Image (tube, rainbow, N blue to C red):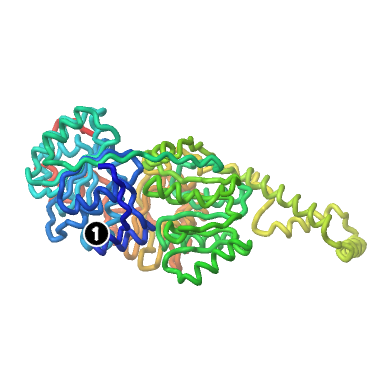
Amino acid sequence: MTKELSARFEDLSILPALQKVIKELGYETPSPIQAQSIPHLLEGRDLLGQAQTGTGKTAAFALPLLSRLNLKQKEPQILVMTPTRELALQVAEAMRTYARYLKGFHVLPVYGGQNMGHQLRQLARGVHAIVGTPGRIQDHLERGTLNLGQIKAVVLDEADEMLKMGFIDDVERILTHAPQDRQTALFSATMPKDVLAVARRHMVDPLEIHIKTKTTTVETINQRYWQVKGLHKLDALTRILEAEDTDGMIIFVRTKTATVELSEKLEARGFSSAALNGDMTQAMREKTVERLKNGQLDIVVATDVAARGLDVKRISHVVNYDIPYDTESYIHRIGRTGRAGREGQAILFVAPREKRMLASIERATRQTITAMSVPSRKDIADRRVALFNEQLTEAMQSQDLEFFEELIDNYQHEHNTGLRRIAATLAFLLQKDKPLQSDADSTREVDQLDLETDDHGDVRDEQDLIQYRIEVGRQHGVEPRHIVGAIANEGKISSKSIGQIRINQDYCLIDLPANLSNAVMKQLQNVWVCGQRMQISVADSGSEKNSRLKPKRRVTHKKFNKYIKKNLKPNRSPRR
């Protein structure tokens, strides 16, 4: 079956709660794999789909299977097998996003390398969907910690990759643990004989769908990406905005809330910015677009749905602050620039575990997206100096300066001051909050934006960290950025040395270097965050106020110890 259906998502029998999310995400027309798969999966049919990565396969199976879910049943009903942990995390995150209005829904990614205790604890609480690699799923089955007896649907995602990685035998063993009357869907970019053999053995009269990939070439757009590192996404964006020679710009984020938040942060940093999202009235959206067209506004922070059909000639840059869910969305986004033969710039922020989507985008556009470095502070200062010189030259040539020349002559005569000194003072006053020189005394400027990161995008640090407590929490409106800013600025602690932050109702726990000096501790105790003094202290489990806190251990509760002892078999090497 190769016919592409021209359906809208509204025409598909997807749950209203899922339709609401689809609308928020900006999805309007299903991709070919979605249009052909969703109706049949909703009917409970087995399906064999051949489509490339990045064509929207996750939504193609997640939306119909979530629509058929029984939320009252706490045993796993959906099992998705993926070849890698990165893909498992990506699929689990997508399912969690689609199900944000399904009250009580739980999805659990399981993969090798993650603490087994965390997975056991989540399984004990009950989950509706399991997304994992075959090796770790098989581990759970052999230990008896995962029961597939209530599974209603199994999905094999990127089956050809699982074949290449030697997982097919594990896949077949896992399938024997699921009920025979389950629904099975298999997706693969290619269909090797061994994959087809698995399909024939474990699927009942599957519907076959083959999607031909349409390649898209965007020759007039220079595409670059920056690998997201740690907590510095906004700082990286700020530097890029200052260093790039931009005209109009659209920055894409995933949610309506993010459009407002990011726009406000950019405004606070001196950029002319506004939000554009589906919550705004049509009149407000049109007014915002008109301001962008006539130069009253330089940056629009938008969602996919709000930017559909947007055509503004002066848009020189498109920034994907949040990576899109599929390649078609990416192509639609960057299509806002580089129009009518003009050159455009597209910048993509990519977290380490999103590199697979980056590869899919490169295949879809048939272009290599080059890595870029975030401008250093010196680069920013050089750019500011260049702009200052341009403004100076332009003003000299275009303005009548006779009055100001007399003003300077009078000042020089009255104060006996050299013209060079007066000019330097005026330049200093003009720079305001954007210094024309980098901080030469800042020997601490090991550029945090270029530090090595772990698989989750967090900056690595080799020093020992211990847990501290600060007396400000969720009830005070604190966010991680408030804490990081206060500690980095007031305590002179490098942000790479700040570890995990756990925000509770009236206090926070934060991992910091074990060797903080008394002077730094005293300084931080008196720092105010969200109207509260931090009053930082070591999280000592023996003190009364920290009686609820325990030092870091692999297992912290007796009951959980028994559960682990019962379910974990010794002397087993971890599997993928």
In this rendering, position of residue 559 left or right of residue 261: left
Of residue 64 and residue 168, the one placed in the foreground of this image is 64
Using a 10 Å C-alpha cutoff, classify the residue at mark 1 as few (fewer than 14 neighbours), some (14 to 19) or many (20 or more).
some
The residue nearer to you, when weighing 458 against 223, is: 223
Can you see residue 116? Answer: no
Q: For this rendering, which residue is in front, 165 or 425?
A: 165
**What amino acid type should be assigned to the residue bearing mark 1?**
Ile
The location of residue 191, given as percent across then percent down, is: 25, 32
Quadrant holding the C terminus: top left
| Residue 455 pos. (x, y %) | 37, 40
Name the residue nearer the viewer: 392 or 112: 392
| The quarter of the displayed image where residue 297 is located | bottom right
In the depicted structure, whether residue 263 falls above or below residue 3: below
What is the quadrant of residue 189 in the picture?
A: top left
Q: Residue at x 12, y 57 (%)?
A: 73
Q: Is residue 548 above or below residue 280?
A: above
Q: Is residue 543 left or right of residue 420?
A: left
Horizontal side of residue 169 vs 310, given as left or right:
left
Residue 519 at x, y percent in the picture: 49, 52
Residue 128, horizontal then vertical, whole percent: 17, 53
The residue singled out by tag 1 in the image is: 14
Number of on-image labels: 1
| The furthest residue to the right | 413
Residue at 83% across, 61% down: 399
Where, by quadrant of the figure, is residue 573 drawn? top left
Q: Going 31% across and 55% down the picture, which residue do you hit?
A: 7
**Can residue 285 be seen by looking at this rendering?**
yes
Identify the image quadrant of the N terminus.
top left
Determine whether 545 is above or below 161 in the image: below
- The local secondary structure at tag 1 comes to loop
